[in-house]
Amino acid sequence: MSQLPAEVRACIAEWLAQGEIDLFIGYEASSLPFQATPAFIRQPEEVDRLIWDATCENNLVSFLKRYRGQKVGIMLKGCDARSLVSLMREGQWIRERLRIVAAACPGVLDVRRMVELAHTEIENLPGQLLPQGWQHGETLTPLADIRHVTCALCLQHTPTDYDLLVGDPPPEEHPDSFAAVREIEALSSDERWQFFTQELSKCNLCYTCRNTCPMCYCNVCFVDQDAPRWFTATTAPPDIHFYQVMRTFHLAGRCAGCYACTRVCPQGVNLWLLLDKLRADVWELYQDDAGTNPDAKPPLTTYREEDDNSFVL
Amino acid sequence: MAPCNCHNPYLPYPMVIRQVTDEVEDRSIKTYDLAFRESADAEAFRWQPGQFCELSLLGVGEAPFGIASSPAEPELLRFSVKKAGVVTAALHRLKAGDQIGLRGPLGNAFPLELMRAKNVLIIGGGFAFTTLRALIVSLLDQRADYGDITVIYGARTPGLLMYRSDLDAWQSRSDMRMIQTIDQPYVGWEGQVGLVPAVLEQTAPSPSATIAIVCGPPIMIRFTMPVLARLGFENQQIYTSLENRMKCGIGKCGRCNIGHKYVCLDGPVFSMAELSALPPEY
Amino acid sequence: MPEAYHLPSGQYDAWLATLRRHGRLIAPVMREGEYRFDVLADDELPMLGRGLTRRSPKWVFFPQHEAMLRFRRQADDYASAEVAQPNNTPQVLLGVAPCDAASLPMLDRIFMDNYHDPYYAARRRNTLVIALACARPTSTCFCHALGGGPADAAGADLLLTVIDGGYLLETITPAGQSAAAGWGLDPADGDHREQATRAHAVAVEKLKPIESLAGIEAKLEGLFNHPLWREAAEKCIACGTCTYNCPECHCFDIRDLPLADGGERVRGWDACMYAQFTVHASGHNPRPDQGARWRQRIMHKFSYLPANIGLYGCVGCGRCITSCPVRLDIRQVLDAVRRALPEEASRGTV
Amino acid sequence: MEETWEPKIVAFLCNWCSYAGADLAGSSRLQYPPNVRVVRVPCSGRVSPIIIVAALRQGMDGVLVSGCHPGDCHYLAGNYYARRRFTLLQRYLEYLGIEPGRVQFTWISASEGTRFAEVITEVTESVRALGPAQRLTINPREVQP
């Protein structure tokens, strides 16, 4: 675990002491090896708990909705910052109420993958498995092998808008993030159905994806609505499809591709395969990327007369 | 009440609606008189005032309602339903002759044994008068077993008082005191005017050898309790009925758990002494 | 009748075949990359001894959802309901960890005390539970803080322990005894028993020393209004994974599923972690914030259940720790409870 | 069973154009298949994607949404917003493996009674060709543990 650099901690402590922020949301070590946990810091003397390293996988933007009206400092990776942009362009948060500590993030660890590779329990993982640049000595495994699958799709390693920066920004990779979507599109309808039915069969309807998504801020989610009642919450495949299809579709034009849902899914469902299709189509049809411009209008709240009309009968 | 191992506790009895009546002027409450479809079910069904049932609409769901009729009224099984959620809205669409399901009786009852030979003070507000009606009918049925009976019942307007014909009949009896009150003066209303706690304070019933039953909206309960305390009532003398969200009604699903009690199983009737030992999660 | 049998590796396959004749076999396997309990295919072998499954096997007795009633629709009226019969097939639950088995006595009390839950009861009656002594406790295990242990057989009908060249099979309940009597195994000898005892001791050695949780219910008495609940819950995202994966959590919801020609009344897991769990029809919520919900989770497990049935609602399996997406550690919350001073509760936050 | 199967289709028609078009088809005594249940909505922009998917889930074999022609919306732009949503929804459902043709969209004006009858015929026949919907349909058998 790597403590935040002293000058960054001092600055956060100063923000708290001066009342520039009421709260700092960052990361601290958890009780589990290789896994950080969100930290909520209100006192300047608590800042020494704050860390930043490849174990900091949660997207802290999803906590912001609880602190409306407060001034908040927050630690953001590049992906998290994109989701903040989407949140801001829906008027859910304003930049003036935020102090952003940006993390230059080469990728976060996939602990499950590390456990699989090492054939052992988490606590027995050798420290050497940690990638270069992180503590614990020499590197045995290249970062690319043990970072989370969604980090290979990284749209932005380092936030572009911040008050403080931690680490050296790695070069942006600009991967072809929709390659997987196109691969699935090339399948037949039946094959796609088989594929997604299999993938979604892992889901156990715990709603972690919804609860961790910064853009899921409905007061009452459609799955919990009583009148009308849309959903019976059984684990029958059509119910799981209904939940996943409707939740993800509600993110059309809003999902910024932070992939926090995929990283936290306790069942390892590759939710990004759903959301990237929506992002790909929104880009193709409306040239919109939810994570770049906080002043842009979300694509489903606007229109052009010359929008695609070819799909109608 | 002995739990029965032979009957699936989740299977509702089939019932038929005998009669539906609008209970109050804004039509937000309807009263349903039900009859068992199977006579064997009717014979096995034994209840006490204060108990509740789950009314069950197949395809819609279930919701708990206090039994508004007394075992002293043969052939009558009555519920009053205020429109609030999905199940109640669906119930409000039903008419005489429609089918409905019923699970129960569930929960505990008002402490009738404890009231024997004592005075009974009943304080009710608004919609929470259903099981109190059952209680009053039971007390009057065995009138000689109890001391003075005083009932204070308030609503916002005269038209929102429930069970008007019962209230009028009780008003004219000489062996009980029936006080009806409304919140504010109303054209044509000649009864008491004032909030329930104020009327209680004026009435000033004696706490000696008295059991008080208080059912009403939370705000009424909150302001009534200090008045009872000033009048000298102890927490062990005061009972109320809780209305937590429930599903199974039989102490399993965990929803109505408060402290080490389950409202559906250990309640819904609790003394204030019991409640004060529980977390305020109701 | 011997209380322990020797199951040499050579007889293992034949023994599995016997189990399959007894009923359908449910055991840990890999499915979609997840180590979990599932019904085995006819030719499929169980994968025993790889530690805890990600999710607990409570679904074998209390499925995530099940139809309780079925009904048909005639014209505009629903005809009366009929009871959906739970699957009555006899089944064998093989390879259950002792902590998971330890959850059964508590679930039995919930579902079979007072009103008898016929769905749970039928599955419980039809299932032979064979536990496997735990040989690889991990750093998140805390069964020993709750009086359990890697070879604690409470809740199981039989207990397997890996010994040289096979297993020791101990019978625990009469049901286990009568089942084992028909399996044609040789009685275990002293050496087998000694090896098993040694294996148990080795597993106990691997457990991290931990302060016992016995008596924590007394400590919880004065802490209802303590600020620790809100502090502990601040990072909680209310996903409910801890309760789904918990072998003891048993709260459920009942919902009607309307279909074109009728429908079903379905019960499914629910959780005190969800805001909607306690909301009244009026909109009032007696547990308005996540701190109050975390308090309920801890109080229910460590105060209310001990008061009501004398058992904790936690077996210390640690699944809620390893599966939490924000790594909220129940042991740390319980530590905070231990350290909390009742007088701080007057500050009242929840 | 197979021989008697008839597709069940729900059509959400906007009050101002498509519903009037259906009316015109009726009053002109045009013949079209009886498989469609019509739900009148104030505007195609009112039709939330969840309503469409919920219809499939509850056993509809096909869903049709029809509004005013682009530029003719009674509320000026409701159908323009709807068009973006429906474009994405149709592509998304097909991506997930729902058969193309289960969910269809069109614009029908109040004067297009003949077109209404043609569209209904076309939708009914294409859904009939697909057979009963199963992929998102909640099936009681699957609720068995």
Image (spheres, grey):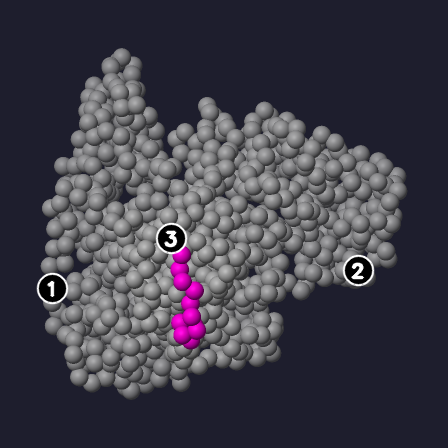
Q: Residue at x 37, y 63 (%)?
A: C7
Q: Which residue is mark 2?
A: B233
Of helix, strand and loop, which one carries label 1? loop
Name the chain under label 3: C
Instruction: Classify residue A31 by image quadrant.
Output: bottom left
The residue lying toward the viewer, choosing from A254 and A257, is A257
Spatial CA distance of label 2 from label 3 is 66 Å
Q: Is residue D114 above or below residue C198?
A: above
Q: Nearer the viewer, residue C16 or A233?
A: C16
Q: Which residue is mark 1?
A: A174
- Is residue A98 toward the left or the right of residue C347 in the image? left
Task: Provide the residue designation for mark 3.
Answer: C19
Query: Residue B73, position in %: x, y?
Result: 75, 33
User: Pointer 1 indicates a residue of which chain?
Assistant: A
What's the residue type where badge 3 is placed? Leu
Image side of residue B212 versus residue C41, left or right: right
**Magenta residues, as a range?**
C184-194
In the picture, the quarter occupied by the C terminus of chain A is top left
